[in-house]
Image (tube, grey):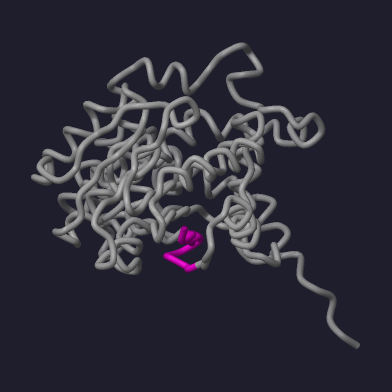
Amino acid sequence: MNPAPSPEHIMQLGMAFWGSKTLLSAVELEVFTKLAHQPLDAATLQTRLALHSRSARDFFDALVALGLLERKNKLYANTPETALYLDKAKPSYIGGFLEMANARLYRFWGSLTEGLKTGLPQNEAKEGGDFFGTLYADPAKLKGFLQSMTGLSMAASKAIARQFPWDQYQTFFDIGSAQGGLVVQVASAHPHIKGGGFDLPVTGPIFEEYIQSFGLHDRLQFVPGNFFDDPLPKADVLSMGHILHDWNLEEKKLLIAKAYDALPDGGALIIFESLIDDERRTNAFGLLMSLNMLIELPGGFDYTGADCTAWLKDAGFRETRVEHLIGPDSMVIGIK
């Protein structure tokens, strides 16, 4: 007789928000930044974080059990991952995205059931607010958000700079370029490449400051515009990273068509996202990201590589291919 299946997976997943909120609170409290300089004992760390004594030790040891901190000789220290990605002083910091998740998304996901029943966003829009409008109106908040996007996409950007055959092309523009993380990685790795970023005008000063910090202002420029209303820059290669999933199907196809029109014969379009696997079974992150689009936007959704290649072919691209980048991220390449 076969033993009964264990309920462990169900319970771990059902209560996964415990671990998630523990990490988000640790980011909010800057635990990993405080530990960046040296390991600390529980009493010292508790004092520096201004925590109550009741649960501080449980909090720190929970972070150890979750693989987010190390403890040796009663001293707490960052893991290699948290030292690289959750120390605010490092350019690789991705905590800005987690800060946003803690301040906003965590509570909005509590309304997922309502979103599934209504098909409507469950964020500030329910109360007449506009997160993105507010964000883009505050330069400091916008800069922090764009920095977090750079950190979040850094590994994928480096993979694109390494994998794509840049030696066959001369010019490159990233559409919806934010801070400019991708163009910096490509231009740094390939000194012959010239181009830049295309995004809303308000992001221009942030893009230009970031480019200047790498000494790439002679090869990379910012072109302001709205990708729905304005022509896209002409270049040998265009890219859209974590852009298409924000929009409905008609809008996705419109952006792909505009990219096709802007490219020369033989030019390439790179689209990268947390692509859902074609069988829709294994890339849970991509599927959950698509649910996040339900929470955040009126028409956005994520998609498979097969979906995207079909849209590219409909737009006229003669060749397409899908390549895995890193983690849940993959890119779809279309050749005109």
Q: Residue at x 82, y 33 (%)?
A: 117
Q: Residue at x 15, y 50 (%)?
A: 37
Q: Which image quarter holds the N terminus?
A: bottom right
**Pick the front one: 251 or 184:** 251
- Quadrant for residue 224, please give it: top left
Q: Position of residue 251 (x, y in %)?
A: 60, 36
Q: Residue at x 65, y 37 (%)?
A: 250
**Pick the front one: 218 or 258:** 258
Q: Position of residue 94 (x, y in %)?
A: 34, 45
Q: Tell me, yes or no, if residue 283 can be seen here.
A: yes
Magenta residues span: 323-336
Question: Measured along the vertical axis of the image, is residue 275 above or below residue 107?
Answer: below
Q: Tell me, yes or no, if residue 44 can be seen here.
A: no
Q: Position of residue 245 (x, y in %)?
A: 56, 43
Q: Residue furthest front?
A: 265
Q: Position of residue 302 (x, y in %)?
A: 61, 48
Which SS type dominates the magenta stretch?
Answer: strand
Q: Is residue 36 covered in magenta?
A: no
Q: How many marks?
A: 0
Q: Residue at x 66, y 41 (%)?
A: 249
Would you say 256 lies left or right of 267 here? Answer: right
